[in-house]
Image: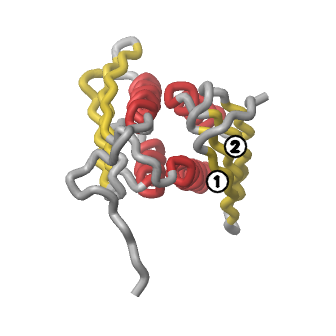
Amino acid sequence: MIAKRQGRAAELTRETKETKVRVKVELDGAGECRCDIPDPFLRHMIETLARYSGADLRIYARGDIEHHLIEDVAIAVGRAYAKAMGVTPVKRIASATVPMDEALVQVTVDLIDRPFVHIDLPDQMYEHFLRSFVMELRATLHTMVIRGKDPHHIVEATFKALGMALKDAMSLSPTVVSTKSTVRWRAG
């Protein structure tokens, strides 16, 4: 069971004609994940992201086809992470490099509210996952495969590195880390 903690948390549900996804996230957790997703590799990557980012995640997801399921889980998880972060100042920028057997992958994130991705992955579905996740997180993401041959190892090392970079970038900061200070939006 995911322990109750005070901190940055969010809960949301995304429902379409094609999918239903429920997400609960506690960013300042222990990396625990209860993941009810029928796709075993997607489940494994979500558990990996939770573990390495230190976030406690509960996810229920069902979909009509693999593509819709992967995309909508990414959208919901990205939005939940963003909602849980709120407007509290964070370190913002972080990188991590992860080896996994013959694979070596580097991931860099900037939690800046300017979505951009440059993804180097041998798997189009998980490239799409990362793009959807980052657009909802409203972050900048760069991934680079330094070396590797096994697509599974490359994708998994990418998720580990993303989790580690997010954990570092989401860590609290005493001040806003930006020359712009805090961005304020006004209607009209």
Mark 1 vs mark 2: in front: 2
Which label belongs to residue 65?
Answer: 1
Q: Quadrant of residue 7?
A: top right
- Residue found 27% across the figure and 33% down from its top: 144
> At label 1, which amino acid type do we have?
Ile
**Where is the N terminus found, in terms of image quarters?**
top right
Residue type beneath disc 2: Ile
- Nearest the eye: 101 or 134: 134
Q: Is residue 188 above or below residue 111?
A: below
Label 2, residues with CA under 10 Å away: few <14, some 14-19, many ≥20: many
Q: Quadrant of the C terminus?
A: bottom left
Residue drawn at point x = 74 percent, y = 34 percent: 4
Residue that mark 2 sits on: 59
Q: In this picture, is 74 found above or below 41?
A: below
Is 33 rendered above or below residue 26? above
Position of 40 relative to 182 (above/below): above
Name the residue at the left extreme: 179
Percent position (x, y) of residue 80? Answer: 58, 51
